Image: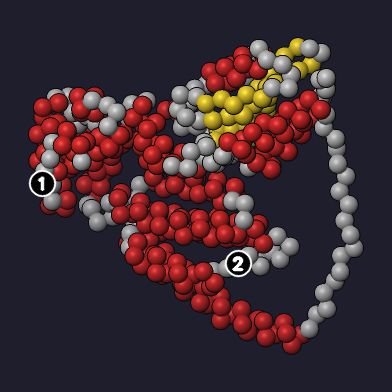
Amino acid sequence: METTHSPRDLHKICATIHTLSKMDVRMIDQEGNSVVNLVNLYLPKIIHTGNEDYNRINYVLHQNHHHTYHYYVNSFGLEYIATGIWKQGQFNGSIVVGPFISSTSVMEFIRTTITKNQLPISQRAQLESFYKSLPIIPSQENEALGEILVTLCQQGFLKATRVTGEIVKPVINKEQINAKITENKHLIEQRYELEKKIMDAITKGDKKAVMEYNQEADDLLDFSNRIPESPIRSAKNISLVLNTLCRTAAEKGGVHPIYLHHLSEKFAILIERAPNLNKLNTLGKLMANEYCDLVHEFSTSAYHPIVKKAVDYIQFNLETPLTLNQIADAIHVNPTHLSRKFKEETGKTPIEYIHHKRIEAAKLYLYRGNQTITDIAFLVGFNDVNYFTRVFKKITGVTPTQYMKK
């Protein structure tokens, strides 16, 4: 028996699922348009499918009975749970929860997705951040989510009333308060000194130092009692501040803002979704390490502004044809001057640098072993497979075929 909900009830169902699951929830009309959007995460343009996914979800739900929920996976491996909205026997759209992923091997999943869909290498950092920020929902949990959706949409939504007990006021002891103030002053000074050390290490890309300081930070940076009645909220607030500090430190270390944006957005979402203090503690350490990795891989702080611009241009256009004259023209500098300056500061000519970056990208595809060497050569920006093979062997010491076998 179907239950007819008002628009307000349907919106409340969406809001309830969104609040509890920390996942994106949308209400979709019959034409596949999103009429309610409760979202924290926006799809990168390169994998955005418009209304295509919602139309497919609606079609399946429309063909089945009222008590059905649909587990849907699109071509990019994004997973959704949805159930239909019915009114007087007519299908009126659906409520869709997701995207999420059910695989715990996130990096392997990303590699597979990039290879399968032949996505541009220059978009890899954005895609990695996006997929890492997705919630991982095992099959047992997404089944439970589907059942809850069906129950709320088909059995009725009851408005609950909250009641509370009497609040017991604590007894104030002035001596204890004064002692606590003195203790806190010393602890705060220690915390700020350790925080400064961690940020300095991130700016330098010194992962070893970051890991050592993280061990000291376990007790010293515990802020969960800042809001006693809500320790998780308190810890999340501090984690969000830490995310901002890490981003600033990495920017000071010479990382381009586009890389910082994706990583910062990923951790902001993961922090809000963290279910407990242990998870937040783990995220804090992971956050410092990943920002440190970002500095190590993408920092251009030691470079002259001209070289810095050239490196950034190469990173963002790696899969397209690149020449010295093209790069020089794009950053408005003389090609000869650029080549000389680039060689002085990186130890490589611009073309040698491009080759090294493309070979590193090619290793990602060769690791999967499910594409031909010719396809991989074109994907990473080489238009001649024989030239690709020669460059690959010169840099790695082995041919692409030998690398795949290893």
User: Mark 1: few, some, or many residues within 10 Å (few <14, many ≥20)?
Assistant: some
**Which kind of residue does numbered mark 1 sit on?**
Arg
Image coordinates of residue 320 in percent, x first then y, are 25, 28
Image coordinates of residue 114 in percent, x first then y, are 36, 31
**Residue 223 to residue 289: above or below:** below
What residue is shown at x 37% (from left), y 25% (from top)?
117
What residue is shown at x 67% (from left), y 35% (from top)?
145
Residue 4, quarter of the rendered image: top right
**Residue 284 to residue 336: above or below:** below
Front-most of 280 and 1?
A: 1
The reply, left or right, for residue 269 in relation to residue 378 is: right
Sequence-wise first label, 1 or 2: 2
Residue 119, quarter of the rendered image: top left
Q: CA–CA distance between discs 1 and 2?
A: 51 Å
As helix, strand or loop, the secondary structure at mark 1 comes to: helix
The reply, left or right, for residue 65 in relation to residue 308 is: right
CB atoms at circles 1 and 2 under 8 Å apart? no
For the question of whether residue 71 can be seen, the reply is: yes
User: Mark 2: few, some, or many residues within 10 Å (few <14, many ≥20)?
Assistant: some
Residue assigned mark 2: 223
The C terminus, quarter of image: top left
What residue is shown at x 33% (from left), y 63% (from top)?
206
**Which kind of residue does numbered mark 2 sit on?**
Phe
Residue assigned mark 1: 340
The reply, left or right, for residue 367 in relation to residue 24 is: left
What residue is shown at x 69% (from left), y 18% (from top)?
93
As helix, strand or loop, the secondary structure at mark 2 comes to: loop
Image coordinates of residue 81 in percent, x first then y, are 62, 29
